[in-house]
Image: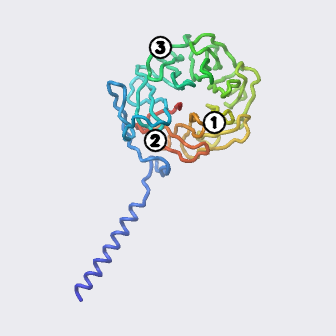
Amino acid sequence: MFERKSFIILSFILVVLVSLGSGCASQPVPAPGGEQPPKSSPNLPSLPPAEKENNVTPQPNGKTPSSSTGEGKLVFVSGNRNQGGAQIYSTNDKGNNWVRLTNNTAADWFPKWSPDGAKIVFYSNRDGNDEIYVMNEDGSNQVRLTDNPADDQLPTWSPDGKKIAFTSNRDGIQQIYIMDADGSNQVRVSGSSMDDAAPSWSRDGSKIAFQSDRDGSPEIYVMNSDGSNQVRLTENGMIDTYPAWSPDGRKIVFQTNENGNFEIYTMNADGSGRTRVTVGYFDNKYPDWSPDGSKIIFYSKRDCTNDNGEIYIMDIDGKNQTRITSTDCTDTGLASWK
């Protein structure tokens, strides 16, 4: 009888312990700031990349490097461990195989792949003010394309790779210029009395989307590539900026703060069909497209307690948001995908 009672008591204790263990295991771990982590964000450690002599860094997200994913390659800006400012890195679109491409005491920003993937255009203040530079995909042969006392920023390639559009305040306000890929024949194409910036070329090369505050607040506009026929696409009195044209030419992705913080939206190339694709209480910014137009790469502060963020990828409808980098929240977005 005593043995039977002991067996029943031990069985009851075992059931209670199993129930308690299951309940603890099911509790989600809060993200920084008390928010629940996005379901699609992997649990990545925040480890800074330690540079090696050959310029290849260990994987900051703890993943095992692969020799080739056969998928895509990203170029982006990270401020991690760079005393002089942000520098440019490349990685595959899974966050593996980091390679540092620039290494100087200044800051390098806004890298964009050329259409053939052989070169990267960017801007840097390494010579005292912001100027446009170009380099090979491995970071070699860095060449300065602009040279004036003003700031030249936010470069982007024409679809055929023969020209570069960029923003310059050489005339006292920000305006959009176009030059040949070697820096020659610099011509102003926007002509308002207010700031015009952040150009993005349509796939057929006939149009350029850009942001302008000519009507009060920054909104998205489109014009022919020669500067004619400038048309406003957004009109909400908030800040709509950083447009990027989809590879098929049908849509434009951009960021807006109409909901308080910056979120990412898409719209048709004529401004219709405006659709919000990110939702949160943190900034989601600097969107760009995957080469096939099926995904969007962007920057988000969602997992960071400081004022920086990390790089994420999502489907164009906002689903499957996945964190790609994890470097103590020092990746500043501005990423490009080939």
Q: Amino acid at mark 2?
A: Cys
Count neighbours of disc 3 (C-alpha within 10 A) and say few if under 14, some if 14 to 19, many if 20 or more: few
For label 1, the residue is: 253
Residue mark closest to the camera, 2 vs 1: 1
Q: Secondary structure at mark 3?
A: loop
Contact, CB < 8 Å: mark 3 with mark 2? no
Contact, CB < 8 Å: mark 3 with mark 1? no
- Alpha carbon separation for disc pair 3 and 2: 32 Å
**What mark, if any, has residue 69 been given in the picture?**
none
Whichever of labels 2 and 1 marks the residue nearer the N terminus, that label is 1
Quick one: which residue is furthest to the left in this view?
2
Q: Image point 41% across, 22% down: which residue?
A: 84
Q: Secondary structure at mark 1?
A: strand
**What mark, if any, has residue 127 been given in the picture?**
3
- Alpha carbon separation for disc pair 3 and 1: 32 Å
Picture coordinates of residue 263, whole percent (x, y): 60, 41
Picture coordinates of residue 302, whole percent (x, y): 50, 43
Viewer-nearest residue: 270 or 215: 270
Asked whether the viewer can see residue 211, the reply is: no
For label 2, the residue is: 304
Q: Amino acid at mark 3?
A: Asp
Q: Amino acid at mark 1?
A: Val
Count neighbours of disc 1 (C-alpha within 10 A) and say few if under 14, some if 14 to 19, many if 20 or more: many
Contact, CB < 8 Å: mark 2 with mark 1? no
